[in-house]
Image (cartoon, rainbow, N blue to C red):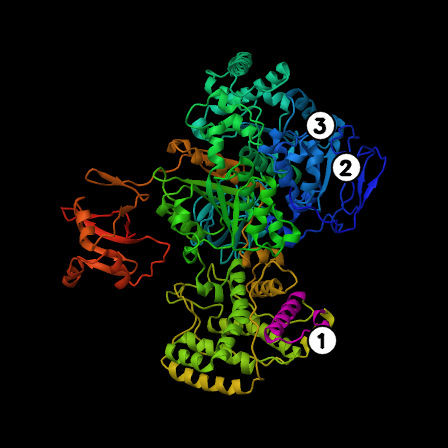
Amino acid sequence: MLPRKRTGGCGGEVVVGDSKKSRIDCPISCSTIEINNCNNNSNNNNCNSSSIVSMALGNGNPSDIDEDLHSRQLAVYGRETMRRLFASNVLVSGMQGLGVEIAKNLILAGVKSVTLHDEGTVELWDLSSNFIFSEDDVGKNRALASLQKLQELNNAVAILTLTTTLTKEQLSNFQAVVFTDISLEKAIEFDDYCHSHEPPISFIKSEVRGLFGSVFCDFGPKFTVFDVDGEEPRTGIIVSISNDNPALISCVDDERLEFEDGDLVLFSEVHGMTELIDGNPRKVKSAKPYAFILDEDTTTYGAYAKGGIVTQVKQPKILHFKPLREALKNPGDFLFSDFSKFDRPPLLHLAFQALDKFLYEMGRFPVAGVEDDAQKLISIATNINESLGVGKIDKIDDKVLRHFAFGARAVLNPMAAMFGGIVGQEVVKACSGKFHPLYQFFYFDSIESLPTEALDPIDVKPQNRRYDAQISVFGSKLQKKLEEAKVFVVGSGALGCEFLKNLALMGVSCSSGGKLTVTDDDVIEKSNLSRQFLFRDWNIGQAKSTVAATVATSINPYFHIEALQNRASPETENVFNDTFWENLDVVVNALDNINARLYMDQRCVYFQKPLVESGTLGAKCNTQMVIPHLTENYGASRDPPEKQAPMCTVHSFPHNIDHCLTWARSEFEGLLEKTPAEVNAYLSNPSEYTSSMKSAGDAQARDNLERVIECLDRERCEIFQDCITWARLRFEDYFANRVKQLTFTFPEDSATSTGAPFWSAPKRFPRPLQFSAEDPGHLHFAMAGSILRAETFGIQIPDWAKNTSKFADAVNNVIVPDFQPKTGVKIVTDEKATSLSAASIDDTAVINDLVTTLEDSRMKLPPGFKMNPIQFEKDDDTNYHMDLIAGFANMRARNYSIPEVDKLKAKFIAGRIIPAIATSTAMATGLVCLELYKVLDKGHKVEDYRNTFANLALPLFSMAEPVPPKVMKHREMTWTVWDRWILRDNPTLRDLLQWLKEKGLNAYSISCGPCLLYNSLFPRHRDRMDKKMVDLARDVAKIDIPPYRNHFDVVVACENDDDEDIDIPQVSVYFK
């Protein structure tokens, strides 16, 4: 079973009563669990329809957002969407694999309540796709069996159950209802009620049938989408506006505008043409990369002088949904996912209707492998098609319908995970108006996942095992391959948790011959709990991989899994050695950074192992299949690196809040981490430190010494009042004095060497701040700075330090010296500059003087003195780290008239938080596991595989075949990046050269690591001809070959007989 639920934080107790009314609108602050009069046996299906009406919940206020828990989700949705979710009640009907996946995602998202409805009981068949159920649950009601374990996911969500027949009137208690196992007749009845209800109830019908799935959405006759894509409004910095009809607006060319024709935009900060800053949106007529035509006559407006920001105005969109009754007959445009199957959605539209009719007539699903059942379903589909008249399909693909019939009873875990993500996101849209809904039908299939060999009817018969549903689709032979697989899962965060759940349910590595190794060097944090669903709050601080493996084993007790805490990197190749890699069948990446992905890609290419890759960013996700010899590797194509702001822009000429926050984090780390660490480095070995500074003799060494002296002499703090003084003077330095110096050096009317205004877009002319303890921003900056400064010096922080009134009195007592700007101060304006420290011809002399001063300062220190460097931690709202960074950034923003941000938005940017939600993660892992069937079956062609990009916000699904690897040719030989040439039997250098010569290749250079073992131009290298290659590697290249390794690699540069360079694969030389 999953980790057991702890006692409710509010001391909840079980109360038995006889209330007949559903308490779905029970306030979030309720502190009891109420159960209607019924037998406590969870197998009893005769309970009143609201068998469990409320659970013990958290701290009671539904509008409070736990930012530590939901920070990654807030980065996607924002506060307003989250508040709407917190007020939403959702029904999920049908608690097989798909229903529980949807419920899981909604509970993690934090809706107000989720009601689980199911009249059926758990069967062994369900264990193929439902991570909640165990064999002990067989025979129990599905909804009741799901309750406790789903509640553990989020105690702030009320989890309710309904176990008897649902009536349409009960639907009025919900904002959205989802049905995963319902007849068309009943679905039409319920949808009619929801569609006509006031206000409308969002209705979603979704099914997973083997390798086929469907979604239908009806959010009512008039549904408002407040934000169609979730992207930030696009902005541009104006450089000119013409007095024309229509007007031409040109913007700076450092970033593309990305406006579209028809967009509405607002103007601000425009000087001269003030008619445009009246607050009214205006329409873009013709958008270009760095300019656009404004649909307005500006010939009579004032002449544009300078400045200006243009910002996109996001418009709500009204959607008019058709009810299911009408949409079945006239579905409109289907949402496509795979354009190689352009004709598939209309066929599946028929197939699901035919299955409904089959169920109605036969009272059961078609049986896998029974041809008569398949033919009956095909006949029903054909009859429905003929009744459509002009809208009928020209040709029905019997093969597809046959696969559909044989898998119709099975709910496969990867399909449930994928559709659980899609449908969960549609529910969020229905409850919040955030993102564009699916309009209205989506059909999907993955019949390419089937084994390449035809299935024998005997092979798909049930075996009274938990994998029977999967066996009915793929057969027992592939099931055995899954169970015996050797798998390496790298990472056990959000993706990793989903993967381990999926793989456990699929039976991967679940026999004595199989093994799954999962590794992750991270520990569980509170912010993980909103997505990484295998973890609970009592796991915080524990190793992710260990906890994830333990819980995955509770999902499937046969899971053969080993958890490690090693980072997969060159440093751990003694752990993940050659033998480990050679035994693997597939690698599953569940990583969150590019460098780690590239390393794993290199290892998979080297050992020729399949790699299944995926990633998410907010509502977006992508998957990539890296298959030896069939596809290009992950590193073959990369996104361009993110554009970095020039250093001079960040430090002196910011023009957006990102620049301010980048600078703020840099200052935080410099003042509170790097400088105290530098102090400790000096104090631990003064003579060695000063010697290294003298040896360096550069501007960086000078700066280091100056910062250390500041801490130990001029700005050393002994009592808390010293820390207040330091923080107040820092405010004056950063936000007043530096600005005064900058504007003294470059006055507002300054010109460049070409005569152009210096302060032209995108530069913004700054104004100094005047400190006031009555300004909350000023005071909070000083307070956070004082507290953190005290921490670095180990000074006790008095209780009154966090009292704004008392702190204001203390900060007002600080004497601030007057400041006069200086002439001759150099301020870096070169955008290509990489350092703000200017070298000086007398650096050496200055450094010698600084060392002397530093020695004098050290003598005055108390014995054992050292500082406490502070490492930035974004996810602890009590540590004042983000308070200081937000204060830094917002005060600087005020200097430059840049809009300020709250602490949460500052955390997203400065903390480099990757937006993440459970729905896109679930979808990505489901898609990958559909590909995993192909990988482990072996024998699939490249055209059978699919890479996917999806954006659940739009929604958009784009699937395509992977790109084959680039092929190199020489004579009759061909090779790709996947090939590695192997030379065995401990060869000499002469053996290697002769081996290549036989291939028509003349080697002129051989290197091992950074060292050259052979070059044909060096006569002395000919003396090495009869030496063993391994000896050359050890003696010349000085490589240390670990005892577990039986080979090493060399890079050979070759020419053909026509003196043309030939790029050959890496050569592995085996010496034992």
Q: Which mark is residue 119?
A: 3
Q: Earlier in the sequence, mark 2 or mark 1?
A: 2
Residue 132 lies, in percent from the top left, at 64, 38
| Mark 3–mark 2 distance (CA, rounded to whole Å) | 14 Å
Tag 1's secondary structure? Answer: helix
Q: Amino acid at mark 3?
A: Glu
Discs 2/1, front: 2
* Label pair 3/2, CB-CB below 8 angstroms: no
Q: Read off the residue under disc 1.
A: 809
**What is the count of numbered marks?**
3
Residue 191 lies, in percent from the top left, at 67, 26
Instruction: For the N terminus, give its image quadrant.
Output: top right
Q: Nearer the viewer, residue 902 or 937?
A: 937
With 585 as the anchor, is 1033 left or right in this view? left
Q: Which mark is residue 52?
A: 2
Q: Residue at x 65, y 70 (%)?
A: 783
Q: Which range of residues does the magenta coloring cover?
A: 776-802
Q: Nearer the viewer, residue 309 or 181?
A: 181
Residue 1064 lies, in percent from the top left, at 25, 47
Using the image, determine if residue 825 lies above or below residue 88: below
Q: Amino acid at mark 1?
A: Asp
Using the image, determine if residue 1064 lies above or below residue 794: above
SS majority, magenta: helix
Tag 3's secondary structure? Answer: loop
Q: Amino acid at mark 2?
A: Ile
Q: Earlier in the sequence, mark 1 or mark 3?
A: 3
Q: Earlier in the sequence, mark 3 or mark 2?
A: 2
